[in-house]
Amino acid sequence: MNGNHLLELARNVVKQAQAAGATDAECTIAEGEEFSASVRMREVENLKEAGSRGAGLRILIGRKTGASSTSDLSSEGVAHLVKSAIELADITSEDPQAGLPDDDEFGAIAGDLGLYSEDVPGLDPGLKIDTAKRAEEAALSADPRIFNSEGASFDNYVGRHLFANSRGFAGEYRSSYCSLSTSPVARDGESMERDYWFTLARGFAGLEAPEDVGRMAAKRALRRLNAVKVPTQKVPVVFEPRTARSLLDNVFEAVHGMSIYRHESFLAGKLGEKIAAACVTLVDDGTLPGLFGTSPFDDEGVPSRRTVVIDHGVLKSYLMNTYAARKLGMKTTGNASRGLTGNAGIGHGNFFVEKGVQTPEEMIAGIPNGFYVTELMGFGVNIVTGDYSRGAAGLWIRDGELAFAVSEVTIAGNLSEMLLGLEAIGSDLEFRGSVAAPTLKIGEMTVGGK
Amino acid sequence: MQFSDSIFAVRFGITRHDLEAYLAEALSHGGDYADLYFEYLLTSGMSIDESMVKSAAQGVSMGVGIRVIAGERTGYAYSDDLSPEKIRKAAHVAAYIASGPAKVDKFDLNEGVRHNLYPVLTAPTETAFAERVELVKRADRAARAYDSRIFQVQAIYADNLRYVLVATSDGVLTMDRQPLARLSVSALARENGGVPQRGHAGGGGRVELDFFKEKTPEHFATEAAREAIVMLDAVNAPAGEMTVVLGPGWPGILLHEAVGHGLEADFNRKGVSAFSGRMGQKVASELCTIIDDGTINSRRGSLNVDDEGNATRRNVLIENGVLRGYLQDKLSSTLMNEAPTGSGRRESYAHIPMPRMTNTFMLAGESDPEEIIRSVPKGLYCVNFGGGQVDITSGNFVFSASESYLIEDGKLTRPVRNATLIGNGPEALKYVSMVGNDLRLDEGIGVCGKEGQSVPVGVGIPTIKIDRMTVGGTA
């Protein structure tokens, strides 16, 4: 089935829902093909290939809602989809804020956003396997202490996303990606550690060299060897970009419009206030060509855009869909997100901290005693209170240099204090996914150890 | 249920002969083994927020996953279209992994005897929506009625009904009908405009809707509200090594993270687990016997057959502190030349199976739980947790306490704020010095993630005392 046909189908589902009594309707259709090749210890381990598609419908009858989804796009399947959504409106409540976006909100960014690369669909399976093998080989041969491997995998995807609603919006876009990752295991005496590294891009040509991925993965696994547990103490903590990204994930949850109207975020009610150090500017931008948080329109048919969330430490905006915006008396920021169906949730575009001027080395150089965090574990972040306590591993900073590996410790603080305590922001911002952060330094946190 | 009565035969017209033909196609390029996993899944869910039922959704999805194993290599393809042409095409793609003449060409599919662990006549998914939506409405009312300081309540009810059929080139032909339901409640409390605190509770299983007559919405709602109110008085958690006492039930997540994942056979076959090569060695105190049991009636983690068609079992992982067994799937058990343990699971037809846990728990000991707390001069008593995570290779694991109390001179004193506990799998349980007589299984809310696949699981534990564990607070 080609894209035009699917968009027609989406419009048709909306019409059938209206004919069945819906006062408004939104239909999402997604189809995609995935391929995955993994190798381990230089041999092919798994090959996986498949295509799938599905449709979702959300309807309103007045201010009551219902939703349904199906993987059966036959006419019987669609009839069942419509009936399923309509009958659920009987059990939901009148919600004064429920509804589609205002008519003047709909639209899509024009032009090519670089989300789809022609080189992905026709990629030779042999080339994919070979690419994975090269990455693993580079890791295995990097050092004699790399003695084992969890393998390497090459994944690619091409898909099409379509959305139509009862206000006349209909849009679609294609997307693609390729990714390559490898996970070597290092050993030295009793100490065994693994780590990973990866590259991803919209097209094959955008991937980093497999050898670079393998060598970086090996370097990361090796530097974790012979880790010790340090005594409990309060010290400056530096987050490398990979772990700094997870701090941004926490901040995203805290500026999430739904959490704000429910008062379940430590940032609720803080708009216009200084909530972070002046060096912090945090942006959500769904318009940057080729990146993984980019889309022409959000999952309510509202154009993606750039929103400054924190400007030099001051909280400027929450991220919202139509519903959260109405609850808060504001306007949607084009951040609606959902799977195939249901009320729209909230997602981010490209969510990043603007880079600073210091190199990571310069940031570390000024620290006599501190912790450089390369791995975070667990779910010990409470967005309601900001309480933060996670498992961590990394390298100890002694006299301005990375001195030895540390593991089986915790780092703890409170996100409010951590954001205000950001003392330095690195110059090393790069996008490896839709959330990106440079190296970040926080003045003081509690390291829990011996 | 016989194959001829299954939804796949009745609704989709699939015959035994078709199954044999698809297996033959999958093995047409050679290979040691092939299997077919058909799935038909009905899902529904509804939620309440601000005392309004704001969402309700239902869905249907179906598909077949086809796998070919040749040595250590796996070929996998799936189709969400159950027409013969699409299934044959998927079989052809899966066959790509193998090369050489076909080794297996005759399949004598036999329907074996199955457990009947969840004899549910009417699955919750098949009941009227009006009955189910009452559950979230009652939860909302009960949580708000618990205390005037409760100011936000959300309740989510979700269920599904999964029909599966597994046919293998080893001759296994099995079907199962797997119901699952869960109610979760979250409550926020606030006092005089201060910092809000959250409480969570929930439960369910492979049950009929009548389950919620015993474990009522009011029970879960009251529990969530109670936790939120308790946390209003919480002080900062301590930091560093100390004695930790875990309460019974859900704190069994310790076992899931500290030892369960590390004993999954795929990691051990590859030699990348901190437990690799330690079979028969002492990895816990002799007070610890740890079981993974997929055969407990009506439990969330139970299955009549695993997702490779093998009957689930009660597997002893650690016996009196000594490492006894791994959790196996088809691939690893074949390559390691060990018996399958009924632990091959997958999220859906679109996923390759791997060794997974079912219901993981520690057997009861002899200590009185109150005596355990009395024996601790200074420490932390943890009764409720959020999620956990483990690094298989180093063995380091974490789990996050959402409700815990300081123990001072053998008495529980102040509640403390969220703190992560961290330890090392093969070491942590050596410090278990007391095990209570109060084994309890969790209420049925667990979801386990591994390599991007989520499956429902259960845990359980009696009250235990761990003499040394690192607590990640700030005080």
Image (tube, grey):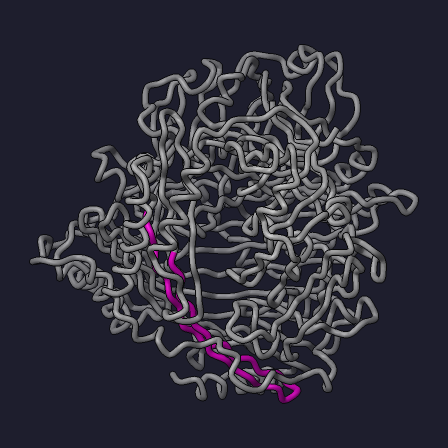
Residue A326 locus on image (x, y percent): 79, 71
Residue at image coords 43%, 59%:
A199
- Most foreground residue, B155 or A142: A142
- Most foreground residue, A152 or B31: A152
- Most foreground residue, B17 or A25: A25
Q: Is residue A355 above or below residue B342?
A: below
Q: Is residue A72 above or below residue A418?
A: below
Residue at image coords 52%, 67%:
A292
Residue A112 locus on image (x, y percent): 51, 83
> Which quadrant of the structure image shows residue B420?
top right
Residue at image coords 31%, 50%:
A138
Q: Is residue A52 above or below residue B317?
A: below
> How many discs mark residues in the rendered view?
0
Residue A171: within the magenta?
A: yes
Left-right relation of B322 to B376: left
Q: Is residue B279 above or below residue B312?
A: above
Residue B355: within the magenta?
A: no
Residue B147 appears in the rendering = yes
Main secondary structure of the magenta stretch? strand
Left-right relation of A344 to B408: left
User: Residue lying farthest right?
Assistant: B192
Left-right relation of A354 to A146: right
Residue A11 locus on image (x, y percent): 54, 86
Residue at image coords 60%, 37%:
A400
Q: Over which residues does the magenta segment extend?
A: A151-180
